[in-house]
Amino acid sequence: MAFTYFFRDMQTLEMIRDYVIPQIRSRRYIHIWDAGCAMGPEPYSLAIVLRENMGMIFRNVKIHATDIDNSNLFGDIIKKGIYPREMVQRIPEPIFSKYFSAADEPEHFIISEEIRKSVEFTRHNLLDMKPIRTGLNLVLCKNVLLHFREEERIEVLKMFYDALDDGFFATEQTQKIPEQMQQYFEPVVANAQLYRKVT
Ligand SMILES: C[S@@+](CC[C@H](N)C(=O)[O-])C[C@H]1O[C@@H](n2cnc3c(N)ncnc32)[C@H](O)[C@@H]1O
């Protein structure tokens, strides 16, 4: 099972805070797809950053978290929002005490209901090439595309392009956009891991 922990990738979260939130905050509904979300720290970390920076507008946010979930466990884990200490210990203290409380199980912590309600998990295979929905404002797909063949990556990126409204795509820094797809996604910053859909 993929091991991830909360606030693992501060750089991506900060880019979303600085470049994506200002562009999407005025939308009536904000739909985000976290594709390949593993057992939840990534979509929940993103939800916390959005809540911290959007205030009450956060109630308009829905994060559609998906994973192929070979273990068939992620749905339950994400719904419960309970994680062991080693997965939450890198969260900055003020954020941790604001959004987590002790769970019944020793050394486990539960995320606040407001954050839990913003993330919805669906089991989904990216290679079926069916988007979770359209009209998206942000697609986050990190450390997943590297497992696919080049032709599959291109097809998945086309699917993301079609599923996005006028929105953003975030991936890991080492993931380069295949040449055929470069006209569809423009880097938002140099040395990009954040792209904007070209319309
Ligand atoms: C290394 S983890 C990355 C987790 C998270 N995105 C991160 O960066 O911390 C890769 C995830 O991709 C998922 N995955 C692999 N193939 C997939 C597919 N075809 N469709 C959806 N998810 C897939 C795996 O189940 C795993 O949870």
Image (cartoon, rainbow, N blue to C red):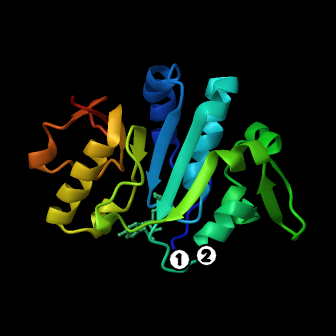
- From the image, tell me which residue sits under label 1: 1
The residue indicated by pointer 2 is 73
Crowd class of label 2 (few under 14; some 14 to 19; many from 20; radius 10 Å): few
Q: How many marks?
A: 2
Where does ligand 1 appear, by image quarter?
Answer: bottom left
Tell me residue 130's x, y (percent). Answer: 32, 59
Q: Is residue 135 above or below residue 150?
A: above
**What is the secondary structure assignment of the residue under circle 2?**
loop
**Residue 153 in the image, given as x and y percentages of width and height:** 22, 59
Residue 164, can we see it? yes
Residue drawn where x is 26% and y is 43% of the image: 161
Going by the numbered disc 2, the residue's amino acid type is Leu
Ligand 1: does it lie within 8 Å of the C-beta at label 2? no
Question: Is disc 1 in contact with disc 2, using a CB cutoff of under 8 Å?
Answer: yes
Q: Residue at x 53, y 23 (%)?
A: 25
The alpha-carbon separation of the residues under discs 1 and 2 comes to 10 Å
Q: Residues within 10 Å of mark 1 (few under 14, many from 20)?
A: few
Q: Nearer the viewer, mark 1 or mark 2?
A: 2
Q: Picture coordinates of residue 194 (x, y %)?
A: 34, 37
**Which residue sits at x=44%, y=29%?**
20
Q: Which element is circle 1 on?
A: loop
Report if the beta carbon of the residue with label 1 is closer than 8 angstroms to ligand 1.
Answer: yes
